[in-house]
Image (cartoon, rainbow, N blue to C red):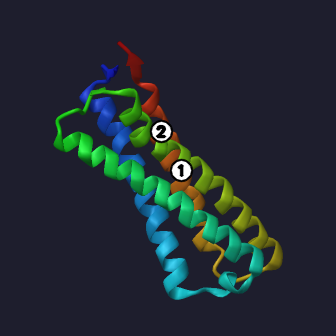
């Protein structure tokens, strides 16, 4: 089992930007596929955005796990599997999403394609999710 003795104030300070991160990532990803900006016509960027779909799926697994934990009142004491499926998935999905999105952003900027803001939002959201999900993950200690 793993337990966090984090204060409520610190939890909120990490939780809010982390939530902004995964929401921004998923909204940016949805907008890419719905609005289909010019960047979507570039083969490599399209491939990277498909990888971002996997990163978003990992984030959703983490969110689903965290919601399940909250429903079961397991907020601060978690088995190892639940900790990794929740905060671990959020941190990993955020990191991978940030890296993939930065690559897409770099290609879009180098080619001068319109719609480069989308991978920028994805990279920013992934970074927030990675940073703050990771900080919450690190607060858990083995008991």
Q: Quadrant of the C terminus?
A: top left
Q: Secondary structure at mark 2?
A: helix
Residue at 49%, 78% (x, y): give it.
31
Q: Which mark is residue 88?
A: 2
Residue at 24%, 33% (x, y): give it.
75
In the image, residue 44 above or below residue 24: below
Q: At which x and y percent is residue 72?
A: 17, 39
Q: Which residue is under mark 1?
A: 94
Q: How far is disc 2 from disc 1 in space, using C-alphas?
A: 10 Å
Q: Secondary structure at mark 1?
A: helix
Relative placement, left or right, of 35 versus 42 is left
Q: At which x and y percent is residue 19?
A: 37, 51
In this view of the protein, can residue 136 be seen by the observer? no
Q: Quadrant of the N terminus?
A: top left
Residue at 61%, 86% (x, y): give it.
37
In the image, residue 18 above or below residue 83: below
Relative placement, left or right, of 14 versus 98 is left
Residue at 47%, 45% (x, y): give it.
89
Q: At which x and y percent is residue 63?
A: 36, 51
Please identify the quarter of the rendering in which residue 120 is found: bottom right
Classify mark 1: residues with Cα within 10 Å, few (<14), some (14-19) or many (20+).
Answer: many
Please identify the quarter of the rendering in which residue 87 is found: top left
Q: Earlier in the sequence, mark 2 or mark 1?
A: 2
Q: Nearer the viewer, mark 2 or mark 1?
A: 2
Q: At which x and y percent is residue 110?
A: 82, 72
Q: Nearer the viewer, residue 21 or 13?
A: 21
Classify mark 2: residues with Cα within 10 Å, few (<14), some (14-19) or many (20+).
Answer: many
Relative placement, left or right, of 111 versus 63 is right
């Amino acid at each position: 089992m793993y337990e966090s003795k984090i204060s409520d104030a610190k939890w909120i300070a990490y939780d809010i930007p982390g939530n902004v991160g995964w929401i921004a990532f998923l909204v940016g990803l949805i907008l890419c596929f719905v609005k289909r900006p010019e960047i979507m016509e570039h083969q490599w960027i399209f491939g990277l955005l498909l990888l971002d779909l996997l990163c978003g799926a990992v984030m959703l697994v983490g969110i689903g796990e965290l919601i399940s934990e909250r429903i079961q009142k397991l907020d601060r004491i978690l088995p190892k599997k639940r900790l990794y499926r929740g905060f671990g998935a959020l941190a990993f999905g955020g990191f991978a999403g940030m890296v993939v999105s930065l690559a897409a952003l770099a290609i879009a900027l180098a080619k001068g394609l319109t719609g480069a803001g989308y991978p920028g939002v994805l990279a920013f959201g992934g970074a927030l999710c990675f940073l703050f999900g990771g900080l919450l993950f690190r607060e858990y200690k083995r008991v």
